[in-house]
Amino acid sequence: MMQPAGPNILIVLTDQQSHHLMSCVGTSWVSTPSLDRLAAGGARFPRAYCSDPVCVPSRFSMFTGRMPSAIGMRGNGGQGLLPFQPAHDASGLGHLLRGVGYETWYGGKVHWPVGLTPQRLGFEVFSGDERERLAVETAALIRARAGRRWAMVASLINPHDICYQAIRAFASDGMDRRILAGGATELANLDEALLPPRGVDRDAFLRDHLPPLPANADIQADEPELIAAVLAARPFKAAARAQWTAQDWRLHRWAYARLMERVDRQIGVILDALAASGQERDTLVIMTSDHGDHDGSHRLEHKTFFYEEAARVPWLMSLPGRIPAGRVVDDGLVATGLDLMATCCDYAGAAQPAHCRGLSQRFAAEGGTPVRGAVYGENAISRMVATRRWKYVRYDGGAHAEQLYDLERDPGETRNHAGDPANAAVLADLRLLLDAEIAAHAALAIGPMPPPGPLGE
């Protein structure tokens, strides 16, 4: 087979990284020189949203080009999900790129449903590690493949270890205890992240070094009723919300930032190898995350809900000579779960499968106008559409089930405009848009939708 004309493709994934957790966006309590370097050399899209703000459905979407509802999935678990058949496997991202001549490699965290593996979706696994060793092995593979045409995924685990802070503080059932029992590495990393800076005593650390609470730290006055129901299904979440002090929340934000710096160092190892091997100018790098973390907003930690901190993630693209350095596409929306496949296919010269409603971000990254006017998302208890100004979330039931946020005037999503007569026309338009998205994706499902599962992740 002839070598493809497209560039190498390097997909770098982090886990649970909110859009704001990079110093290049102005966050002063985190330092991410590796991601800053990537952003400075390419394009940054500040308005990227995941398909579902929890791990499994988001990751499923990115590598299949399908919304999680295509298999009846709305959360991390789920009984009776629709199975993938070989014909479905064949349209996985790895197979699409392999079909046009790429070597396809996958290393790190997978966390996909219905028995899917990298091999089933067309990748060869080169590393099962998710941390420092993955970075070293990715760097070695990049150096070894110089002169070949390759597509590679490096799926790193952090800053996901932040999840263990609230679980350890409020473990109350067998599930929590099993998580902690199997989390020696995660807890060790968390404990390191909670340490004061070298040479700073504990009192000075707590007084002078912790990040501030977010501006939207208070619980929304008319919060959707189903949020409390989800928190009650995992009692440690409800306990953190009820019992953590301002200092506890600020410690959470401190540790979250330190875990991000840890994974940024790992990304630096990978990017250094790309540059040192002479392949940087011939490699498209796409960096994103599966979802974010509420990080103290609305007195929440972990993920799940469609608040910006959990649903909005980084999206960086670099290809020297083709993507202008330092480009910031402020008005460009990205649907990471669908647009990753579309963008990779565009650069590789592969046909985008009919089931994928993604839009390639190549044109916007290379200096053109943004290509997407709205993004759609699903989770365990609601559906969402966001435009450049507005976000509309419709919950499955309960009080305050419709939420309308003006992201220009209220980026912290503290006020619900759904009942405001002045915005009735906006609400009506977004209701129609959401209904159209739901119908379009339902038509692409691979079988009948199973009944809803339990609340939670």
Image (cartoon, rainbow, N blue to C red):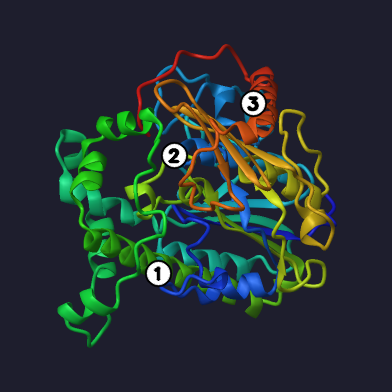
Disc 2 residue type (three-letter): Phe
Compute the Cα span from label 2 to label 3. 19 Å
Disc 1 to disc 2, how far (Cα)?
A: 26 Å
Within 10 Å of the Cα at label 1, are there few (<14), some (14-19), or many (20+) other Cα atoms? Answer: some
| Between discs 2 and 3, the one toward the N terminus | 2
Residue 456 shown left or right of residue 239 in the figure: right
Q: Which amino acid does label 1 sit on?
A: Arg
Mark 2 nearby-residue class (10 Å; few <14, some 14–19, many ≥20): many
Identify the amino acid type marked 3.
Arg
Q: Residue at x 41, y 54 (%)?
A: 216
Q: Name the residue under label 2.
A: 305
Q: In which quarter of the image is the C terminus?
A: top left
Task: Look at mark 1 in the image and give the residue it sits on.
Answer: 262
The answer to which of marks 1 and 2 sits earlier in the sequence is: 1
Q: Which quadrant of the figure has residue 296?
A: bottom left
Q: Which of 273 and 354 is in front in this view?
A: 354
Q: Whole-Å distance between the Cαs marked 3 and 1?
A: 41 Å
Q: Quadrant of residue 352?
A: top right
**Mark 2 secondary-structure assignment:** loop
Local packing at callout 3 (Cα closer than 10 Å; few below 14, some 14-19, many 20+) is some
* Left or right position of 220 against 7: left
Dots 3, 1 in contact, CB < 8 A: no
Task: Specify the label residue 431 is tagged with.
Answer: 3
Q: Which mark's residue is nearer the viewer, 3 or 1?
A: 3
Is 259 above or below relative to 361? below
